[in-house]
Image (spheres, rainbow, N blue to C red):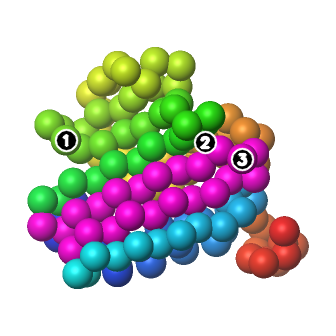
Amino acid sequence: MAKVAATEFSKAVVGVCSESKAVRTWDVKIFEDSVARIRIFLVDSSFIDVYYNAETKKVSFAWIINNKRAYGTDNLGGWHIHPVGRPDIHSASAEVDFREFLTNIEQKIGASSRDRNKNPPGDN
């Protein structure tokens, strides 16, 4: 991943969230435009924590259910996935972008991207 400012990274994540029926709302925190922490609240009461550091290029996505990581991916030590049901395992993978991560969760909870013409953002 090329170095991108935290605000730009956050805008991309929020853009994906705004297209998803699985997402209720989100909270973005940016620190000195180098670090972004985003919490994304889902319709099933679970949430996703997103972390991005522009200086170190660290990226992590974690799906949290009942205050425990159920699934995740990050690039600490190389891209890897923490599989659903085995979040303690590190399974090597190619780079995972946020859209791909959210799509995997949507499939698990039975929600998918909005049809922009039928259900625009804000019309939940």
Q: Position of residue 88 (x, y in %)?
A: 37, 21
Mark found first going from the N terminus, 2 or 1: 1
Asked if the stretch drawn in magenta spans residue 73, the answer is no
Figure quadrant of residue 116? bottom right
Distance in Å between CA atoms under marks 2 and 1: 21 Å
| Residue 12 in picture, x, y percent from top left | 44, 73
For residue 19, the mark is none
Question: How many labels, in total?
Answer: 3
- How far apart, in angstroms, are the residues tagged by discs 3 and 1? 28 Å
Graded by Cα atoms within 10 Å as few (under 14), some (14 to 19) or many (20 or more), the crowding at tag 3 reads: few
**Magenta-colored segment: predominant secondary structure:** strand
Q: Specify start and end residues of the magenta stretch as a single range.
A: 34-55
Q: Earlier in the sequence, mark 2 or mark 3?
A: 3
Image depth: mark 2 or mark 3 in front: 3
Q: Residues within 10 Å of mark 1 (few under 14, many from 20)?
A: few
Q: Kindly identify the residue that appears in the image at 21 percent across and 54 percent down.
A: 58
Could you tell me residue 40's position as x and y percent? 57, 59
In the rendering, which numbered label is found on residue 45?
Answer: 3
Residue at 52% x, 25% y: name it: 84
Q: Which residue is mark 2?
A: 105
Q: Nearer the viewer, mark 3 or mark 1?
A: 3
The amino acid sitting under disc 2 is: Ile
Is residue 109 shown to the viewer in this render?
yes
Query: Could you say which is closer to the camera, residue 94 or residue 83?
Result: 83
Could you say which quadrant of the image residue 44 lies in? top right
For label 2, count other residues whose C-alpha is less than 10 Å away and answer few (under 14), some (14-19) or many (20+): some
Q: Which residue is mark 1?
A: 76
